[in-house]
Amino acid sequence: IPDDLARRYIKGLDHQSFEIDERLRRRVAFSVFNLLDLSRAPVKEIDLIFCQNVLIYFPRERRLEMLAGFASLLKPGGVMILGPGEVTQWSYPGLERVSNRQVLAYRRLDDPRPSLDSV
């Protein structure tokens, strides 16, 4: 975590643990939902999707369906980070690959997003 962000948002509790500032915690939403039924996801405008070492357990066709579902949940400017090797040669309308050899990531460019019903 960059020093300037750590000073603003992190309070050290002891040498092994820390706490995130309440102002930042209020802006973060965590939820549980079925990845195979993304149309029922409780959050529809997501800034960041971090999905690593999950898709590799599904057949390719199902992975593509799930990726399309994730992509439709991203808000404009939102980023989806995937594990290396989880998908190859994939693209989706309105997403651009983030130019970085160290991470497999996509950024939403446009709006409106396709409906999950069309996925």
Image (cartoon, grey):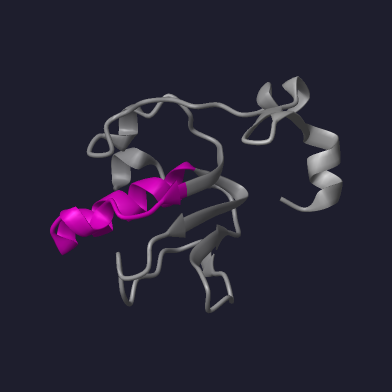
The residue sitting at 62% across, 35% down in the picture is 16
- Prevailing secondary structure class for the magenta stretch in the rendered image: helix
Image location of residue 52, percent across then percent down? 37, 54
Residue 11 image-quadrant placement: top right
Image point 37% across, 25% down: which residue?
A: 32
- 7 lies above or below 60: above
Image quadrant assignment for residue 13: top right
Inspect the magenta stretch and tell me whether residue 70 lies in it: yes
Question: Which x, y percent locates residue 104?
Answer: 46, 68
> Residue 86's quadrant in the figure?
bottom left
Left or right of residue 14: residue 84: left
Residue 84's place in the image compared with 2, above or below, is below
Residue 7 lies in the magenta-colored region = no
The number of discs equals 0
Farthest-out residue, left: 59
Taking the spot 85% from the left edge, 36% from the top edge, the residue there is: 8
Residue 103 visible to the viewer:
yes
| Magenta-highlighted residues | 50-73
Give the percent coordinates (x, y) of residue 2.
77, 53
Please indicate whether residue 93 sits to the left or right of residue 88 in the image: right
Is 118 displayed left or right of 31 in the figure?
A: left
Whether residue 113 is visible to the viewer of this picture, yes or no, is no
Which residue: 28% across, 38% down? 35
Q: Is residue 12 above or below residue 4?
A: above
Q: Position of residue 7 (x, y in %)?
A: 85, 39
